[in-house]
Amino acid sequence: MGQKANPIGNRLGIIRGWESNWYGNRKDFAGKLIEDHKIRAYLNARINKGGISKIVIERTLGKLIVTIHTSKPGIIIGKGGGEVDRIKEELKKLTGKEDVQINILEIRRPELDAMIVGDNIARQIENRINFKRATKLAIASALRMGAEGIKIKLSGRLAGAEIARSEEFKQGRVPLHTFRMDIDYANVFAQTVYGKIGIKVWICKGEVLAKRDLNPNFVGGKSDMSERRGGREEARGDRRDDRRGGAGDRGRGGRERRG
């Protein structure tokens, strides 16, 4: 079948949780699903430059809880929290609910978030920056922040070419069929004067061996991955130092015997 499954949907219930947490019966399931889509579409359009990664929606006993994961919380919060209050009132009108709560979670490492990486590349392409330069910078930043691998695919009239084509940039490892691998995925569009350009981003953050909390607001895992990676590098460094020290002692010993 090839690699046609969405890497996020493929891992739901294994190492990833659902971004909509609520129960719906036959009567109200469709209505809640459409409402979720309206909330996400509205917030993404309303906070266009807010660095939004994902929007988690929870419903409990008539209460609507919207959690926005963003790399720029200051833009969403606004001065003195006024912007959040305005967004809350607008969501009340949109959904017709009185009890609406908005939570904002900051993404500490936006270079490891596929949606933010794709959005940054799209903005640069819209500003007429060369797509190869923007893509290579994103790959270098992700690998520098501890990603095990990253793959970016761009499709469309790249650089304004007459014939649309696809180009793929890959570095490191991105095993899409390994369920334990924490792979973040996003599909973003750049609207240019010569048409739309599609951008797909896959970022491999490492292997998850322990049981992970499936709460979509869980922000762990990245730090654990970096700690595991740092521990391995320290161990490798110690082993290298030991080898060098032994070789040096042997060399000095040899020179002393010769002397």
Image (tube, grey):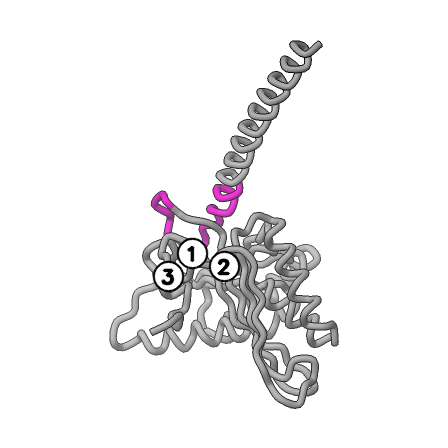
Front tag of 2 and 3:
3
Rounded to the nearest angstrom, the CA distance separating label 2 from label 3 is 29 Å
Q: Residue at x 65, y 80 (%)?
A: 158
- Near-viewer residue (77 or 235): 235
Q: Is residue 206 visible?
A: yes
Q: Residue at x 53, y 55 (%)?
A: 172
- Count how many numbered circles sit on residues in the image: 3
- Residue 168: x, y in percent? 56, 70
Which region of the structure is painted magenta? 209-226
Front tag of 1 and 2:
1
* Quadrant housing residue 237: top right
Give the amino acid type for the residue marked by disc 3 in the picture: His
- SS of the residue at dot 2? strand
Rounded to the nearest angstrom, the CA distance separating label 1 from label 3 is 21 Å
- SS of the residue at dot 3? loop
Task: Identify the residue under disc 3.
Answer: 177
Q: Residue at x 55, y 58 (%)?
A: 113
Task: Identify the residue under disc 2.
Answer: 67
Rounded to the nearest angstrom, the CA distance separating label 1 from label 2 is 10 Å
Give the amino acid type for the residue marked by disc 1 in the picture: Pro
- Residue 134: x, y in percent? 68, 66
Give the amino acid type for the residue marked by disc 2 in the picture: Thr
First of labels 2, 3 by sequence position: 2
- Residue 232: x, y in percent? 50, 36
> Left or right: where does residue 149 sit relative to residue 10?
right
Front tag of 1 and 3:
3
First of labels 1, 3 by sequence position: 3
Task: Identify the residue under disc 1.
Answer: 216
* Quadrant housing residue 87: bottom right
